[in-house]
Amino acid sequence: MRKLLALLLLLVLLVVADRSAAGYAGRTLATELQRSGGLDARPSVVVDGFPFLTQAMAGRYGRIEVAASDVPADDTTVARLEAVLTGVRVPLSQVLSGAVTQVPVDGVDARAVLGYDALSRSSGSRRLTAEPAGDRVRVRGEVEVLGQRLAAAAVSTVALEGDVLQVL
């Protein structure tokens, strides 16, 4: 009975150590992302998968989730950025020595949310505004027709085509 209890206690301690190490890694990565990305607030980083310690020793992490708010991007700010990285490869020796210079990944699934004010600014026109219209966006502005300025509005969807944000 004592051996079973000791084994159970050891197993609990290993699970606690593993989850603590995963939490510490996530917090450390979040702090570095905040510093290197010039973020006002520390992002949320979750290193998924169990056991974490075997992933760390192998230098390969199955899934890392990152979420950040108010992310500076060129001349605008992304209101919310969420990304799931899969197949992340970072050798433990580089992590321990602080010499991580690149982070190869097999895949990234990301979602960026722009505020309506950022969408209006990115249009290049001072007279164009964007506002919510249910699950779509209402774009208002002025157009010139035969020398006359006319107000115009359209309800559209927004899509990213390559590196260009398009209102469709």
Image (cartoon, rainbow, N blue to C red):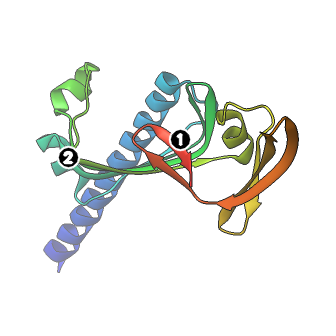
The residue singled out by tag 1 in the image is 43
Q: Quadrant of the C terminus?
A: bottom right
Looking at the image, which residue is at 20% across and 68% down?
A: 6
Q: Position of residue 147 (x, y in %)?
A: 84, 35
Mark 2 surroundings: few (<14), some (14-19) or many (≥20) residues within 10 A: few
Q: Amino acid at mark 2?
A: Asp
The disc placed on residue 106 is 2
* 83 sits left or right of 41 in the view: left
Q: Position of residue 8 (x, y in %)?
A: 23, 71
The disc placed on residue 6 is none
Q: Quadrant of the N terminus?
A: bottom left
Please state the total of marks drawn on the protein image. 2
Looking at the image, which residue is at 20% across and 43% down?
A: 56
Which of disc 2 and disc 1 is earlier in sequence?
1
Looking at the image, which residue is at 24% across and 60% down?
A: 50
* 64 sits left or right of 150 in the view: left
Mark 1 surroundings: few (<14), some (14-19) or many (≥20) residues within 10 A: many
Q: Position of residue 144 (x, y in %)?
A: 80, 38
Looking at the image, which residue is at 87% across and 40% down?
A: 149
* 144 sits left or right of 158 in the view: right
Residues 153 and 21: in front is 153
Q: Amino acid at mark 1?
A: Pro
Residues 29 and 85: in front is 85
